[in-house]
Amino acid sequence: MVLKLVEASDADLAKIRKLYLEAFPAVERVPFWLLKRRAKTPLAEFCSLYDDDAWRGFIYTVKDERLVYIFFLAIDASERSKGYGSGLMTLIKERYADKIIGLSAEMADEQAENNAERLRRLKFYAKNDFLPVDFYTLEKGGVKFEFLTEHGQKVAPMAYPDLMHRCLGIWQKLLLPVKVISKDS
């Protein structure tokens, strides 16, 4: 396995779009045209994961001078559980070594239909050194998301919603309403 993370080519975008539509529920998606448009600015980028010359998945990040937010991350369904996810996390940490890396994952909730999936994701992120910080977010549909950073590094609670607003502009309030909630309250 020789993994590399590269800026997605135009040829990759068709594969990325297909996987994006398969891997993420409609309520969590942002219009693909908007993601592509923002990826043409310094605020966001699509990157493809390759094993030698074989495409395996992608990430979409939103970034500023201090924070990189992993907005979407997916491995092709036929390639999951083969180490590509952890390999991708290692490459992300190398690529953005000078920044705080953050991501969101649905909080564990015994009442949720997908609680087993939520727990599996949180375990995967913890295995890859991404730990909860001192706040969580309440997002579209009333879903609570843990905000995780590498080694639980501190990040200003408003850094994430502010970054998303800069990236998505007027679309942010409609597509990704975010309320930050301190765990101390």
Image (cartoon, rainbow, N blue to C red):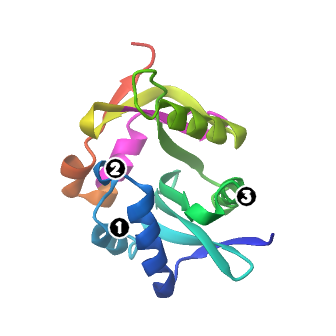
The type of residue carrying mark 3 is: Lys
Q: Which residue is mark 3?
A: 82
Indicate the secondary structure of the residue bearing disc 1.
helix
Indicate which disc residue 149 carries. Answer: none
Q: Which residue is mark 2?
A: 28
C-alpha span from label 1 to label 3: 28 Å
The residue segment tinted magenta is 144-165
Q: Is residue 153 above or below residue 55?
A: above
- The residue located at (57%, 65%) in the rendering is 76
The type of residue carrying mark 2 is: Glu
The type of residue carrying mark 1 is: Leu
Indicate the secondary structure of the residue bearing disc 3.
loop
C-alpha span from label 1 to label 2: 13 Å
Q: Residues within 10 Å of mark 2 (few under 14, many from 20)?
A: few
Residue 71 shown left or right of residue 50 in the figure? left
Identify the mark nearer the N-term, 1 or 2: 2
**Nearer to me, 121 or 98:** 121
**Nearer to me, 35 or 109:** 109
> x%, y% of residue 168?
28, 58
> x%, y% of residue 101?
57, 48
Q: Is residue 150 magenta?
A: yes
Identify the mark nearer the N-term, 1 or 3: 1
Which of discs 3 and 2 lies nearer the camera? The answer is: 3
Q: Is residue 8 magenta?
A: no
Q: Which residue is mark 1?
A: 35
Q: Residues within 10 Å of mark 3 (few under 14, many from 20)?
A: few
- The residue located at (65%, 41%) in the rendering is 124
Q: Quadrant of residue 149?
A: top right
Identify the mark nearer the N-term, 3 or 2: 2
Q: Quadrant of residue 185?
A: top left
C-alpha span from label 3 to label 2: 25 Å
Residue 102 shown left or right of residue 36 in the figure? right
